[in-house]
Amino acid sequence: MEGLHEANVLQKTDLVHGAQIGLLLGALLGCVVGGAVVWYFPIVGIWQTVTVLGASITGALFGVWVSSMVGSAIPNSRLRQFESLIEEGKILVMVDVPEHRTEEIKSAIGARHPECLHCGLEPHIPAFP
């Protein structure tokens, strides 16, 4: 295990998933609130669009902030499929490599550790969501 880095916060927690859900729900709720404001307090001209758009953006930002804070306290939902193997005492190793080197790394690990199970590839995840 020496020389291996511990998983970072984005890999351990559900921060990314929480931020994505918060963005969608916050924007939707902001749009509804902006529409209600325009409906009950009639505003003339382009300010109707600006009000709804501003409320949607504000709701999206607030949703990302709140739900990413909640998500940072929850274990990563993508790792749920490995819980039973980890409880059996197995070690989960995540390798971040460019896609064109995947086969090379898989064969190198397989040559050194034939007991290793390959459980799949995760699609490219940006460094900052």
Image (spheres, rainbow, N blue to C red):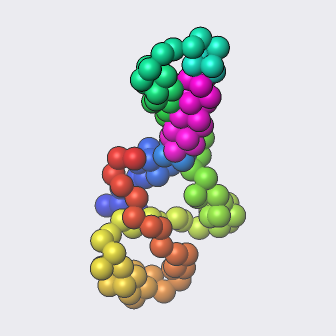
**Residue 34 at x, y percent in the picture:** 56, 23
**Residue 57 at x, y percent in the picture:** 45, 30
The answer to whether any part of residue 24 appears in the image is yes
Give the quadrant of the N terminus.
Answer: bottom left
**Residue 89 at x, y percent in the picture:** 62, 64
**Residue 49 at x, y percent in the picture:** 46, 27
Residue at the front extreme, as displayed: 45
- 85 left or right, relative to 100: right
The answer to whether any part of residue 54 appears in the image is no
Residue range (magenta)? 18-35
- Does the magenta-highlighted stretch encompass residue 24? yes
Does residue 121 sit above or below 46 in this rendering? below
Residue at image position (65%, 64%) is: 81
Residue at image position (55%, 41%) is: 24
Does residue 27 sit above or below 102 in this rendering? above
Picture quadrant of residue 83: bottom right
- 44 left or right, relative to 41: left
- Does the magenta-highlighted stretch encompass residue 101? no
Q: Nearer the viewer, residue 111 or 98?
A: 98
Majority secondary structure in the magenta region: helix
Does residue 70 sit above or below 129 in this rendering? above
